[in-house]
Every structure is written in C-alpha cells, then in structure tokens.
Amino acid sequence: MIIDCHVHLYPPEVAADPRGWSASRGERHWAELAAPLSGARLQGWPDVDTLLADMDAAGVEQAVLLGWYWENQNTCIEQNDWHIDWVKRHPDRLRAFATVQPGAGAAAAEELQRAVESGLCGLGELSPAAQGFSMEDPGWIALVERAVSLDVPVNLHVNEPVGRRYSGRLQDSLDDMVGLAGRFPDLKLILAHWGGLLPFFELNRWVGPRMRNVYYDTAASPLLYDKQIFRAVIDRIGPERVLYGSDYPLRLYPKEQQEPDFGRFLEEIDSAGLAETEKRLMLGENMVRLLGRQSRDGG
C-alpha cells in the first residue's frame, strides 16, 4: 500500500484566480508561495478528479490532504469544509487533516473537534512562524492537548535552516520542535520536509530521547535535497518514523514536468538504495500505524 501523507488540494474557484482569492481573505503569505509575482511557479492546480487519476497512474492507494497554515481562522474553516466534503465523496481514497489558526484561542480547539467529528483524522500543516504563535501560547498548548485527547497526529511545517532563499520562506526554530516533543511525549508529531534536517540532531544525546514519537515526512524532498537523504536519515533513526509525502501538486522536477505527478518522485525513492522492508514502512505501513483506529474505520 502506498499512502501519500502530504498532499494539498484546492477547489476550482481558488485555482481560477489564486491571488484574487487570497487577497479577498487576507492570506498574503499563501499567495507569495502558491502564486508568486516573479520567479518560478511550482504550484499545480488539479481538481479532485485529476488528483485521483494521478494517484491511479502511480499506484498511490490513498492520499492525506493537508490543510494550510492560514493567517485567518475563517480561511481554516473554509478549507476544513472542502476536506470534509472530499473525504465523504471519496472515503476509500482520501483522508484529510484539519487546519486552524492557533491564535484564535478556544475557537481553534473547537474547530479541531468539529473537524474530527466530521471525519478528518489529524491537524496540520501548521506553521508557528507563518501563523504568528509560539510554543508557549496558551491557545497553542490547549490545541495540542486537544489533539492528544483526540489521538490525532499534528503536522508542522519546518523549513530547512540553511539553503536557498526564496519568497515566503520563514525561519523555524528546531529547538521549539524538540521542546514540543519533550513536553508532550504522547503527541503524534509529524515534522514536514524532513523536519529541516532535525533527524541528524537526534545524534545529540539530549535531543534523541525526546524524539521517539516524532515522525518526519519527505514532502518536497527533490526540491531541497539529493536522494541520498533517504539512506542517510534511515541509517540514523531507522525506517519506522519516516513517512512518504510528496507535497503534490508541486512540480518537484520543474525542468522535467509541465504538470505535477506522483510517479517521478516514487521512481527516485525506488532508486535510493532502500531495502524492500524499509520502503514498505515509509510508503504506507508507518502511516497506517500512526492513524491507528482511524485508518481501519475510515475516519
């Protein structure tokens, strides 16, 4: 089974005019990343039928739709409603996480509750830097406690601490991620984009023990890292905490792709020197285990 744990999807009205849509909702940061005025445009705009067709073409059985780290709570609710509808229409192919603005306080935790009761199975992708919250904010703490009580994973966006500068890139604190994992050992925490290379800091004797319940997804890997990262990370932390995620519908190979797909990245993973058991864990079995009862009951 192949489960892509990191997919984004938008309805046709967003794809038709992303900058106009984002301006009407005050979502400046999303516009900088998804529809920049200059530079390469990596974002694709498939509809749900195209997503399912692209999954079929690459043998991806299920996709987990992630929310975005919106600046405004009303936008979060709007996206959650999209996800609830798509999951209800395609329960065998799609799962979805909720998104919230942690700065909304109690309303954020209540929106997570509503979304989970409506069939969503996690929280994220969230970003402290983009959404303007800290790990010590009471609203964030209450939200994490709600996620733990609901037994749903939380996905946090993590940028790489060094590398190419691009519009919309914000600096994340790896210390904050380690502190969060240590404070909430029962939290199912997913750090996107290889956690900004945090797996290598698990070699630190203080960091490693705090990260036992932390997972790393591979979203956007070809845009950031050589394929040797698969072997390097698994050699350090094992295959049980790595999750295949593509960041579809980004064009991960912009010199080769006119439209996004799943197949090219899966081919790269297949050539990365991993054992078949390691690939099975990363490509699906780890996510099934992480979702637990929800993956068996369908939400």
Image (cartoon, rainbow, N blue to C red):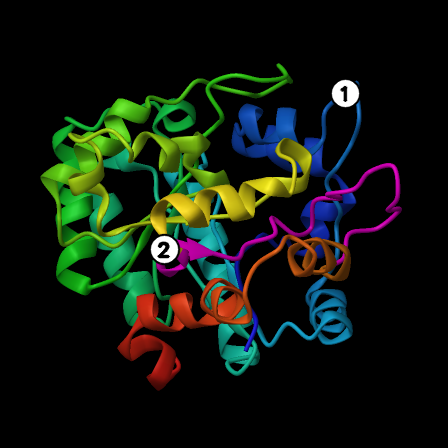
The residue closer to the viewer here, 73 or 133, is: 133
Residue at image location 45% in from the left, 31% down from the top: 196
Q: Is residue 197 visible?
A: yes
Q: Position of residue 16 (x, y in %)?
A: 78, 46
Give the class, few, some or many, for how many residues have Cα within 10 Å of label 2's Cα (few <14, many ≥20). Answer: many
Out of 145 and 254, give the one closest to the viewer: 254
Q: Secondary structure at mark 2?
A: helix
Start-end of magenta stretch: 239-261
Disc 1 on helix, strand or loop?
A: loop
Q: Is residue 279 magenta?
A: no
Quarter of the image for residue 197 reads top left
Residue 37 marker: 1
Q: Position of residue 66 (x, y in %)?
A: 48, 53
| Residue to which mark 2 is pinned | 241
- The numbered mark, 1 or 2, whose residue comes first in the sequence reads 1
Q: Amino acid at mark 1?
A: Leu
Give the answer, above or below, for where 162 lies relative to 27.
above
Q: Nearer the viewer, residue 128 or 35?
A: 128
What x and y, as percent, mark residue 32? 64, 24
